[in-house]
Structures are given as structure tokens and as C-alpha cells.
Amino acid sequence: MFTSIFASGRTRAIRLAGSAAIITILATEAISVPAHAAVSAASPVPGLRSALARATNYQLDLSVSTGGGGTASATKGTIVAVHKGGAFQLYLHLTVTAAGQTQTVIATVTGSKVCIRVSAGGTYQCQVNASLARQLASVNSVSSFNSATTFTLLAQTKSVTINGSPRVCSAYALASSTRGARTQGTIYVLPATGQPCEFDATTRVTVSGQSVTATTTAVWSRFNDPSLTIPSI
């Protein structure tokens, strides 16, 4: 989802990298069906939108690696989203390794208020920043799923552990090309409810004549779990 997080002077910000963002990939304006896809089927997007609209909470476990263009980075972390007061409150805990250095970033989003802490020994910097809050909240925005997108149902399934129990999830292949980024991946969903299980993708983008590749794995390891809450900061 996030390929880089940086601190500059007195400010701290999270840079959203579309090449590794689930939302950017699924919300792309034009997604075509890969030629190798096996069985044509209706898009899973309406089910995904409905499942997320009804969700009380979920936990998303992320792993993103990038390479090429003379740079490499690895991001691992967790996003917790809890529906309160008509909107999702978010908690992000990310560890980013790049250029031999590792940073831990913790962020919370409540309405338009964003609090961010860079490194374990740092202090939280809080501000009302509606623009940044919208960017972070778009991680779970149901509007990010484009109902016009076409997918292809694959013959394979995958067992994904959700709320501590294995669930058999259907697989849909997708391919996209937008803003210079080309993505191929698979999204897994529960066939009965449309609930997302896992998303795996590789994105290639050319920046200043150099090719950069981002590989993303995201697992919704908890979904509508009554024990899931936003950790206190």
C-alpha cells in the first residue's frame, strides 16, 4: 500500500505510492482481462463494495517490496479499520526498510485529525489535515472499487486464514495499465459474501526512464471480528 514513508525537517508525511496501492490498482479507469484467464465471470467488485460497506471492522496485513531504478525498499505492517460514528477510524503500524535503514511509523486517522509518529522513540505529531486524512482513509473507501472494472474468475481457489479459521476464497485475475503503471495480480474473495480475503500483485512503472517493480501482498486477516479495536496511542 505504502512504499515509502519519510521525515523531512519538522514535518512528517506518508507518501502514497500508487504502484503499490491496492486501492489505486482496483480503482484504475481501465482494467483488462489477462489473456491466460480461464473462465469468464461477473466482476467481484459489487460484492467487495457491499462487504466493505457492511463491515464493522477489519485488519489488513501488508507486505510490499520495491526494486529497480537504483532503489529498493520493503514495507511490512498492519492497518486496523473500525467503523465508528458513520466512518472508519484507522490505525496504521508500518515498518519500512530502505537504504539500510529501518523506520517504524504509527498513524491514526479520526475524521480529519491525523496523528503520526516516526520511529519508536518519537512523539506523536497531530494535526487537522483533511487532505491527508482522505488519502489515508481511501485505503478502505468503498468508492475506490470501480463497478465498471472487469475481472476474470480463475479455476483455482485459495485457503486464507481469517479470524483464526481457514476460509476457501475464489480467485479473480486482473490486469491494469494506468498512469504509466502496469499491474498483474489476483484478488481472492469469499464467494458467498464478496468479502475480500487477499490481494497479490506485481506492478511495473517507468520513472525517468528507469523501470521500478513493486510486489504487494495484502491479507484481510480479521474481518467483522468483535474483539478488534483501534489500539490506544
Image (cartoon, grey):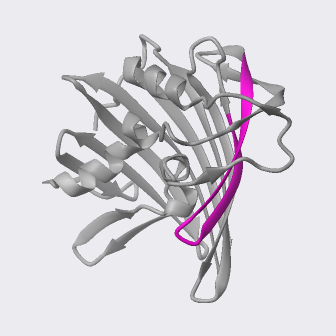
Q: Residue at x 77, y 50 (%)?
A: 34
* Rendered position, 155 above or below 93: above
> Magenta includes 147?
no
Q: In this view of the protein, which residue sits in the foreground, 214 or 157?
A: 157
Q: Is residue 175 left or right of residue 147?
A: right
* Rendered position, 49 above or below 178: above
Q: Give how far across and how far down residue 138 sits, in percent.
A: 36, 45
Q: Residue at x 56, y 42 (%)?
A: 149
Q: Quadrant of the C terminus?
A: top left
Magenta region: 168-187
Q: Residue furthest bottom?
A: 209
When asked about the image quadrant of residue 72, the answer is: bottom right
Q: Is residue 193 left or right of residue 124?
A: right
Give the total of numbered labels: 0
Q: Residue furthest left?
A: 128
Q: Give how far across and how far down residue 141 sits, in percent.
A: 37, 38
> Magenta includes 171?
yes
* Rendered position, 113 above or below 74: above
Q: Is residue 202 left or right of residue 111?
A: right
Q: In this view of the protein, which residue sits in the foreground, 166 or 119?
A: 166
Q: Residue at x 18, y 22 (%)?
A: 85
Q: Give how far across and how far down residue 21 sits, in percent.
A: 52, 53
**Magenta stretch: dominant secondary structure:** strand
Q: Residue at x 61, y 73 (%)?
A: 100
> Does any portion of residue 70 appear in the rendered image?
no
> Does any portion of residue 140 appear in the rendered image?
yes
Q: Is residue 94 left or right of residue 120?
A: right
Q: Give how far across and how far down residue 175 sits, in percent.
A: 69, 52
